[in-house]
Amino acid sequence: MNDTPVRKVIRLLLVFYLLSYFLFFLYSIYRFTTTRILSVFMWQYLFNMSMVLFLRYLLPVTVSSVMITYSLTFKIGDLYTKSGLPRPFSEIVSAPLVFFIILTALYIAALEGLNPGAASKLESEKYLSSLAREYREEWQNELDKKQYKEALKYINLYLGIDRANKNILDKREDIRLLALGQETEEKKRTEGEKTKSSSVSLNKADEYIREAEKYFNTEDFFSAHYYSALALEIDPERADAKEIAVRSWEKIKNFAASKKEREEALFFKRKQEGYKALLGGEYIKAYYIFKALKNEKPQDRDVSFYFSESSKKISGISFFLNDAEKALTLPGSDELFFVNRKKGKEIEFVFIKKMVKTEGALYFSGIESLKIDKDGKIVYFFRAPYGKYINQTIVTKCIDRENENIHKESIYIAGNRPREERNIISLNPSPAELEKLHTGYGTLNGMSFAQLWFFRKDFAKYGFPLELIENAILLKLLEPFSFLILSLFGILLGWIFRIRYVSRPPFLAYLVIPVFPVIVFFAVELYTFANRIVLGYVLVSFGFSAALVFLLVLESFLLMLAMVLLAGQLTE
Amino acid sequence: MKKSLILIPLILFIFIIVVIVLASLNILFFWGINYSSVSAANGSPALKNLAYRIFQVLAVSVFTTIVLISFRVLKKPPSRFLSFLIILTTSYCILVLSVVGVLKTGGKSKPKQNLTYKLVPERMNSFKRHTVFPVRTNNGKDTNFVILDLNGGKGSQLSYIRNGEINWDNGYLVIRDRNKVIRAEEKSALPIVAEIFKKNAFVNLFLRDLSYFNNDILRLYNVSLKAFLILMLSVIFFFTVCGIFMRITRWPLFNIFLSFAVMRGFFSFYRWLELRVLPQTASVFTVHDFSYFFPSIVIGAVGLLFFLIDILFVPFNYWEKEITG
């Protein structure tokens, strides 16, 4: 016997695997359209898509291959020894059995290792393509409005996805030239701002005091007061900081009084007002004051510096409506609903109509939050049109970049909260978990066994039925058993119904081989469905542990049955 | 003769095994999809419809039995025509008697789904456009509900009903308090665990076709016993004749696959006949009760065609040729 059974099995398996991958590749080419996927992702998409399909249908392909190997490729010469005695069937089946155990391990490694990666890459390619399409639309809109700087921003974002697109690179060059003037002007404006910003990195009280002294000596009393106030924040007892603060404040007041020209005095007064607001924690007010002053006198170094400081401060407590509105036109996750927090009988629900991830930011729209106390009374219930993820919270206050009168925040339908909490939802789930909390029982597709296992308790904590994730875990556990058992039954059926030609099988037999995986696929689906019903029943009636034990018992029984039936086969 | 007669108990034995397996799965499936979260007040509704659940698997069990018994005929070939007659008559008797028997014991019509589902407390109970979360408060009662209504439009989509009353109105969930009424509009209202028993696309398609065939049997049984008996005969004749596929090539594995594919295809073919061909044909033939007999005639004719091919072109021992020479 030159050709061992394992070689026969491996050879045909390889042929089946290669052919099926090739067919899935062709199917992926057929499904590929540049309207859905950017051409830059074409090859990645084709390989990932064919890999996902290949892994999804690996079981029926394997079973078909095994069946055909045992049904078609064993000739009379393979089954008898030279002396004419039939070989024991165990000789034909024992080595492939070991091979299938190894193959099952490889199958699971591929499912757990390759599949989630390929599936998530595929999703990411789809998402990035749709994002790029949105960016393209945005820059065309901005170009129509002659907003070249904005158009340049979007074309750069587009090029962040489709880096080597020569046409777009050329187009960007044109837009860049158009935006150059505006950009240069903006650079000049921000020059002074940058000089000051760099010194903000000083983070020790001594360094702040040194800065404060330096500014006091150069008669920049605003900066001197600002830095002494920062030093006092770190060490409220420092006498030198207190002294500089008092002296510079006096100078600010005197200086304002000594100005004669009305306009300058007014400008100065507003600057003072903005400064007070910034120190007093009214960051949004300070932002608008310095924004207006900056528009009036872009060259004023104080104004540029405090505008930059107030912008930084507001980024922790609010966000720009304009940014949220633009981001939320992009594709994202829809309709997320979950229990955010539960303390005893107190429970807080959060509903998010849409969530969009952009570069470095996470925006939400249609937010609703409802908290109920232990007696079933509403503690608060509010709606907010927009939100942004900032430091594990959803901040719901948003302001217009230019217009002070335009702002949006939480609207309380019932109950109330302290002022500082009115526009904040402390989020329990992480951004990655949020994506899994869709209405209609969430989305568990594409999660690996380990991910499901670790997400199990949190899934229940967010108000979702535990049975669903437990069922998904059971079905994941079923996969290796199904692979091994069905492969063994494949050997069995192939052997029982093997072809008995002395010579080669007729050519027609080879032509019908592609039909096998299709029929086996249907049989595998029925087998999985039957398992699902039985396991589902045990899970719902007796719980997860019982279902786990039942799964092991049932699959061990089926495995044993397959082995016993195999052992009972003869070569004659 | 002996080889042929042994087929009768074998058919019975295989049929019983197949019915037990399929009926058990069917009962568990319907329990999961419909009754697993039913209020205890309903008793054991899964068992109440036991007869109907068994009826649903009878036809497919008989057809599977015919395919399985054909293996035996191949392995130990009995008399060709005697075995054919035995399979035909035994299967026909089993199918007709079991269907009539089961339908008479309570499965005569499709049971109406008017159930009172039990919402799972402290969990999202998801409907098509609604999610209901029963909130358990200090007093241990589940009469408070947080409801997400995705049909809510521009207003709030969350709402809260305190001390509400919950009812099931013909498959619709209705939650009301003094001020408002929330009505889950979809008839597909399902308990939480139904998600676990969800069918995949291929199985769904198969069960759809199978269910269509079963409903048609039920319809004929109720309107015309003669049409029902003739349909049963033509279908059993068709499946018995389909034994030809077990011998059509000398590659047994392919034959087996082909036989199962034909069995699967039969249900789609039947549905196609009834839904697509019958309406067009009925306008041409104005014979009384034509629609009752049309599928039987077509299936019988296809069966007869296979029968003639079998007799004329496929020798009974064709399959074993390469062994016996």
Image (cartoon, helix red, strand yellow):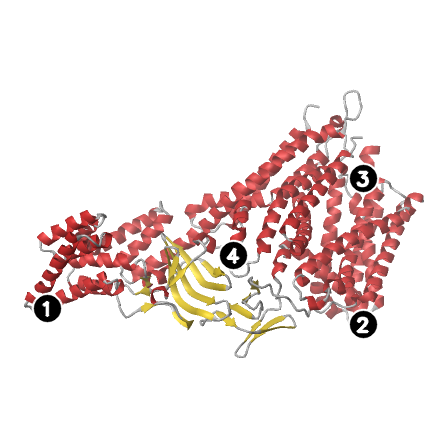
Q: Closer to the observer: label 2 or label 1?
A: 1
Q: Closer to the observer: label 2 or label 3?
A: 3
Residue at mark 3 to residue at mark 1: CA–CA distance: 108 Å
Query: Within 10 angstroms of label 2, few (less than 14), some, or many (20 or more) residues?
Result: few
Residue at 54 percent across and 70 percent down: it is: B144
The type of residue carrying mark 2 is His
**Residue A170 image offset from top left, x and y in percent:** 30, 49
Residue at mark 2 to residue at mark 1: CA–CA distance: 102 Å
Read off the residue under disc 4: A461
Q: What number is the disc on residue A263?
A: 1
The type of residue carrying mark 4 is Lys
Read off the residue under disc 3: B319
Read off the residue under disc 2: B288
Q: Is residue A437 at least partly visible in the picture?
A: yes
Marks 4 & 2 on one chain: no
The type of residue carrying mark 3 is Trp
Marks 1 & 4 on one chain: yes
Mark 1 and mark 4 lie on one chain; the one further toward the N terminus is 1
**Residue B217 image offset from top left, x and y in percent:** 78, 64
On the rendered structure, is A115 left or right of B213?
A: left
Q: How many marks?
A: 4
Secondary structure state at the residue bearing disc 2: loop
On the rendered structure, is B292 left or right of B201?
A: right
For the N terminus of chain A, the image quarter is: top right
Cβ–Cβ below 8 Å for labels 2 and 1? no
